[in-house]
Image (tube, helix red, strand yellow):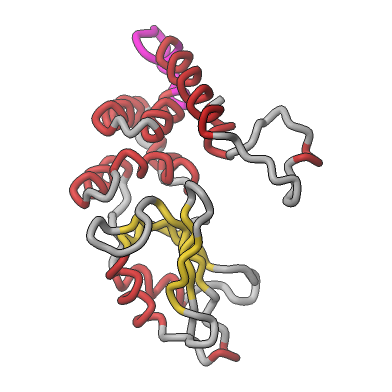
Amino acid sequence: MSIAVLDGVDPYMPMNMRKPGYGYRFTRDQIVRLITSAVSYLHDTTLDVATIDTEGLLYLACMYGYQQQFDEMLEIIDKAAKVDEEIKEEFREPKKLASLLRACGSDPSSIERLGRKIGLILPASKDTFCNFLKNYDLTEKHTFIEWIAIKRPDASGAKGIFVIKITPPYAVNKGLVDASALRIEDGLIETIVPVDKNVTIEELFNRLNSLFFLISPNE
């Protein structure tokens, strides 16, 4: 049930029905029911038991993230990390990280606290962001560079968690880039830099940083 929530698709659905074009998405009510059932099951099977299931704790923390139960989420992260320190790496996986970030809202202190718990510096610095884009492997990957980000509380437009889609800095474009922001919750798109008005990587960071807390690459 937790995996279904994170993936946004029923794991028992035939593979051919999961392809783009079928338009299948869980409704809000379906997600609420899945999360409620998952939390109930994981609570019973991972807490106050003789053998601690760190994977179960991982998904329980993610479900608490969806429910925006910040303190409970951090408590479960701590419990899992005490058993297996390496579990922090799994908490940093994009889909799981996005669910944890839901509990932070747009509060900078909550974002930083979560980052400390899972071993990730949040939000990302200018050097981290720019170096990642400049060193992106253009020979192997030919898709958008994606970054997870949270809209700042004082920024204009819709709030929430976004995936920033950035055109790689191709030589044919003289290393310049454009970008848009896709809100995870509903697919709302905001143009950050129009495709016909490319900017430098440093300028892109400045624009994004004024609107978002930049979290981590979505890969």
| Left or right of 141, for residue 124 | left
| Left or right of 168, for residue 216 | left
**Residue 124 in the image: x percent, y percent?**
31, 62
| Badge count | 0
**Residue 32 in the image: x percent, y percent?**
48, 27
Q: Quadrant of residue 193?
A: bottom left
Answer above or below: position of 124 versus 140. Answer: above
Magenta highlight on residue 46 = yes
**Quarter of the picture holding the N terminus:** top right
- Taking depth in this image into account, of 198 and 186 the one nearest to the observer is 186
- Taking depth in this image into account, of 14 and 93 the one nearest to the observer is 14
Q: Which span of residues is magenta-colored?
A: 45-56
**Residue 49 in the image: x percent, y percent?**
39, 8
Answer above or below: position of 105 versus 194. Answer: above
Residue at the image point whose x is 41% and y is 35% from the top = 87
Residue at the image point whose x is 35% and y is 70% from the top = 208
Answer above or below: position of 216 versus 102. Answer: below
| Left or right of 69, for residue 87 | right
Residue at the image point whose x is 32% and y is 31% from the top = 77
Q: Quadrant of residue 144?
A: bottom right
- Taking depth in this image into account, of 51 and 37 the one nearest to the observer is 37
Answer above or below: position of 39 versus 150. Answer: above
Outermost residue to the right: 16
**Residue 195 in the image: x percent, y percent?**
54, 81
Residue at the image point whose x is 37% and y is 30% from the top = 67
Outermost residue to the left: 109
Magenta highlight on residue 25 = no
